[in-house]
Each structure stands twice: as C-alpha cells, then as structure tokens.
C-alpha cells in the first residue's frame, strides 16, 4: 500500500439555495518521497482536495489514509504552505517560526535552537528578530517554509506557494524548496495552475478538470527532467515536450467545457 | 547666468519649513478662535447683549473656578464624576469585548441572540435610567452601570465585526498545527483585532461621559452632573457653565489619553 491513499473523495459545498460539486470520485495514491503536482484551472477543487488531505476539511464522502491511518485534525505530520505567507505581523520571524511548537505545547530550548537552525538554513538567520513587514516577499515565503518545516512534517502540502511572487524570486525559491525537500526526503503535493512549475518541480503530475473537480489524466515526468533542479529542468528538451503535451490537454479540456 | 539646481537636501529642507509654517498657522487660528470666543462672551455679557443671569461670563466662571479650587469642592465633585466615568468605561468596554468573544466563539449563540442585540442597540440606553436606579439604588453603582451599559452593545458589535474580518487563512495556518478554537482566538483573532478594539475605546470614552452625566442628573447628590442640575434649579448658571467647562476639559483629556495609547500600541504591534 502506498504512503498516501486518497479513496473516492467527493465533496459538496452548500449555500442558501444551491450546492456545488467541488470534487467527484477523486482517487489517487502517492509513494513516499515523491513530489506530486495537481495541475488544473481555477475552480477544479485543487485547494479543496488539499484541505481534505490536511484534515482540516471533512469530505462529504471518501477517506484519506496516511500510512494506513485515517486523517484527522489531530494528525500533525502534515505541513501546509499557502499562497501567501500569512506570517503574523505582530510577531518576529523567530516567533512566527515557533508557532507550531507553541500550539503543540512543545516550546522548549531545543525547539528554539531548531528554529534558529532552520532559519539559518533558509537564509534568514540574520533577520530572525525582524518583523515580517520589513522582509521581501521571497524572504517571507521562506520564513513560512521554515514555520512549516518546524514541526517536522513527513507530508508537505504546497498550495500555489510561489504564485504571489515575482518571476525571478519564484524561480529561485522553486530551486531552493525543491533541493530542501529532496534533502529531507519529504513527500510533497504541489497545487498549481502553472504548467511549467509543475513539470519542473515534480515527479508526477495529475491534471484535473473543473465542474465537478475530477482527476483527468496522469503524467509521469521523465527521469532526465526529474533529476535536474527546477531551473535547469526548464531548459531540458523533454521539459518542453511534456509542457506541450499538457498544454494541448488543458486546451482540449477547455474547449470541451465550452462546447457543453 | 544659469542658476545652480537645488540639491535634494535643500528641497527637503524647504518642504520641512513649509510644513512647519502651515502647522504654526493652524495653531494661530485655533488660538484666535479660542480667545475671541471668550472675549466676545465677556463683552456681550457686560454690555448686556446676552442676559448675564443666564449666560454668565468668563470672569464669573473663572472666579468660581478658583474659589472652588481653593476650598476643595472642585476636586471633590470632579473626582466622583471622573471615577464613575472611568469605571463605566472600563466595565462597559471589557464586558463588550467579552460579549464579542462569545458571539465569535459560538455561531449558534450569535444567531440566537442577534435580534435582541439589534433591539438593545437601537434602544436609547439612558431611557433605562429610572429602571436601573430602582433596581440598583441611588448610589454610584447605578451611575456606573448607566455609563457601562451605554458602551457595551456597540462595543460588542464593532469588536465582533473586527473578529470576523480577520483573514481566515491565519486560522487555517494554526489549524494545520492542530490548534483549538481558543488557541486560534488567543494567537490570531485577538492580536489582529487590537486596532479595532482601541478605536472603540475612543468612542466609548465619549459614551461613558454621556451615561454618567445623565445618571447624575437623575439621582446624584454630588458630581459634575449633579452640579449642573443643582445650578439649573437654583438658577445659578455660572455653576452650570463652570461644570460644563470642567467636563469639556476632562473629557478631552481622557480622549487624548486614549488616542496616545492607541498610537503607542499601534507602534508596538
């Protein structure tokens, strides 16, 4: 059995006079140490799926198994990075990094030491006492990464964490995150609508379609591209090949949904 | 010959000087209005343009002020009113924030209580004065309650809105770490809403004065509100105006204190 099993997840959102089917019969399994991308247009339920995997949203139907165990709110081996950093502006970078241990009642000298080491590793050692407002977008997102890694999650969920950054910062951060996650052998799921980012960073790609959100197709990223850093991967010819295939696929999906 | 271009430093200096001049100018106008108001008041009272019996005059008011300052009656009445106002303000604000917390914590509670809040908010609280006095007696307690009750609902509603407008993604960050609702409140909702809370302080300072003065109108046998009513009854309008001046000064001082507190806290955050 795989590391993470998502079994026939369906989810509905309700409002006053209507409902939407955000996810329908989504099943997939992910091996340990793999980097998986969920790629799709907005409204295909990517973020919903991620929230369900994280255990903060209960699906209408279906189960998620992490190492054979059903996910619940108390599971703390999952880390989640959001589109924006959501650092608390009234806390210093170090205090922000310590959010997890503080909530879990494990704020010790050892965890403070670990937070400092992590900040050092993400290149923020010198600004650990600064306020988030004085940092650039890339630095803030790195601080958010340190906060996420602080509780030592074995599964990392990335919800378009690079989409709010400028292009240069984004490319640098992709490389950085990718190397860091490989080093720690983390299993990661990246949600994105950026085809290039998905191909450059991941081992496997699931293309999703909207209304209702479903897995449409599965792509394996070629070995040659996988072993390169995201920045170098973007220059490999097989990168472009896969990019074009997915681009075609998404175009057809869009055309189909318009014809309906 | 071509004139040498000014450096950034020089231009900045000019800008700063201009700002200073503007500020001084504003101050002069404020002072001018202040002086002419009292001057006009004095003159028109002396020349009989207004009835000196009703409108008194600055000299009479200040004479009463210095007399009362010396014989201790000023401090006696002022102290009572100030303490009642501060107590009413604190109790009203704190219980308002607590009510806002309950509303935020339980959706069910806020749904159920909603129509009652609307009614109670619309109701002019001073109309409750007689009932409060009958229930709580004619002492300070009633007056403080009136000062507090006038702030509590509006605080609760404003602060509750502040709580709700905090970006839910901050809570999401905490939920991933397995935080409880109370931890979410403590870590995110409360600190993020501090600016909202402090801005309600400013409103509440004014409201607490209203409640306390009305309360004193109704029952008190001392305090500034009592002096106003007493002066009115014995037709001593110098006393009425004297109390008004004191209220104006101290209400403004309290407001300034809260405004300073706000600035200081915002800087700290």
Image: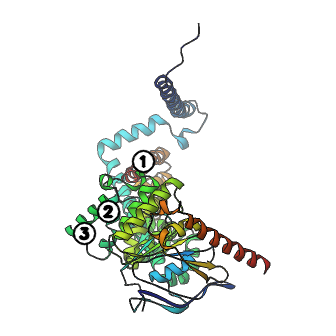
Here the colouring is rainbow
Say which residue label 2 marks.
A95
Q: CA distance from mark 1 to mark 2?
A: 33 Å
Few, some or many C-alpha atoms within 10 Å of disc 2 (few <14, some 14-19, many ≥20)? many
Residue B208 appears in the figure: no
Mark 2 and mark 3: Cα distance apart in space: 11 Å
Q: Position of residue A255 (x, y in %)?
A: 75, 75
Q: Nearer the viewer, residue B218 or B165?
A: B165
- Secondary structure at badge 1 equals helix
- Disc 1 with disc 3 on a shared chain: no
Q: Is residue A76 above or below residue B64?
A: below
Would you place residue A74 above or below residue B246 in this image? below
Circle nearer the viewer, 2 or 3: 3
- Residue B172 x, y percent position in the rendering: 46, 74
Q: Residue at x 44, y 61 (%)?
A: A175
Q: Quadrant of the N terminus of chain B?
A: top right
The front one of B21 and B85 is B21
- Give how far across and how far down residue B84 sits, in percent: 37, 61
| Rendered location of residue A191, percent (x, y) | 53, 73
Disc number for residue A111: 3
């Amino acid at each position: 059995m795989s590391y993470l099993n998502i079994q026939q997840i369906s989810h509905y959102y309700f409002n006053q006079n209507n409902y939407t089917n955000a996810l329908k019969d989504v099943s997939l399994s992910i091996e340990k140490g793999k980097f998986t991308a969920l790629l799709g247009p907005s409204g295909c339920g990517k973020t919903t799926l991620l929230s369900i995997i994280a255990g903060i949203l209960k699906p209408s139907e279906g189960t998620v198994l992490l190492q054979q165990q059903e996910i619940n709110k108390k599971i703390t081996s999952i880390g989640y990075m959001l589109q924006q950093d959501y650092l608390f502006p009234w806390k210093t970078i170090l205090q922000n990094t310590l959010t997890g241990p503080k909530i879990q009642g494990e704020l010790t000298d050892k965890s403070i030491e670990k937070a400092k080491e992590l900040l050092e590793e993400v290149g923020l050692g010198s600004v650990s006492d600064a306020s988030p407002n004085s940092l650039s977008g890339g630095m803030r997102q790195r601080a958010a990464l340190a906060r996420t890694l602080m509780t030592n999650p074995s599964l990392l969920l990335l919800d378009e964490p690079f989409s709010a950054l400028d292009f240069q910062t984004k490319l640098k951060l992709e490389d950085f995150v990718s190397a860091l996650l490989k080093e720690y052998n983390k299993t990661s799921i990246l949600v994105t609508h950026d085809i290039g980012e998905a191909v450059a960073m991941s081992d496997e790609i699931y293309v999703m379609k909207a209304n209702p959100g479903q897995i449409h197709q599965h792509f394996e990223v070629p070995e040659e591209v996988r072993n390169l850093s995201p920045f170098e991967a973007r220059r490999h010819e097989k990168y472009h090949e896969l990019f074009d295939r997915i681009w075609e696929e998404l175009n057809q999906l869009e055309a189909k949904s318009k014809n309906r | 010959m071509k004139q040498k271009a000014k450096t950034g430093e020089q231009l900045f200096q000019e800008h700063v000087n201009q700002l200073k001049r503007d500020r001084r100018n504003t101050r002069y106008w404020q002072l001018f209005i202040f002086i002419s108001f009292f001057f006009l008041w004095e003159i028109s009272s002396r020349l009989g343009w207004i009835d000196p019996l009703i409108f008194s005059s600055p000299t009479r008011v200040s004479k009463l002020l210095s007399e009362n300052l010396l014989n201790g009656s000023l401090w006696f009445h002022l102290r009572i009113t100030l303490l009642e106002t501060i107590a009413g303000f604190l109790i009203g604000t704190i219980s308002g924030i607590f009510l806002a917390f309950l509303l935020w914590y339980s959706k069910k509670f806020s749904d159920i209580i909603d129509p009652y809040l609307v009614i109670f908010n619309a109701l002019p609280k001073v109309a409750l004065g007689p009932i409060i006095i009958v229930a709580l007696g004619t002492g300070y307690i009633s007056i403080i309650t009136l000062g507090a009750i006038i702030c509590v609902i509006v605080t609760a509603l404003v602060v509750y809105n502040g709580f709700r407008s905090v970006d839910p993604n901050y809570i999401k960050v905490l939920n991933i770490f397995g935080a409880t609702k109370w931890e979410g409140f403590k870590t995110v909702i409360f600190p993020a809403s501090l600016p909202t809370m402090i801005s309600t302080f400013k409103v509440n300072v004014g409201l607490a004065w209203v409640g306390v003065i009305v309360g004193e109108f109704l029952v008190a046998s001392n305090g500034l509100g009592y002096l106003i009513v007493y002066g009115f009854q014995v037709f001593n309008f110098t006393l009425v105006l004297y109390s008004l001046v004191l209220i104006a000064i101290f209400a403004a001082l309290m407001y300034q204190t809260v405004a300073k507190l706000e600035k200081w806290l915002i800087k700290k955050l």
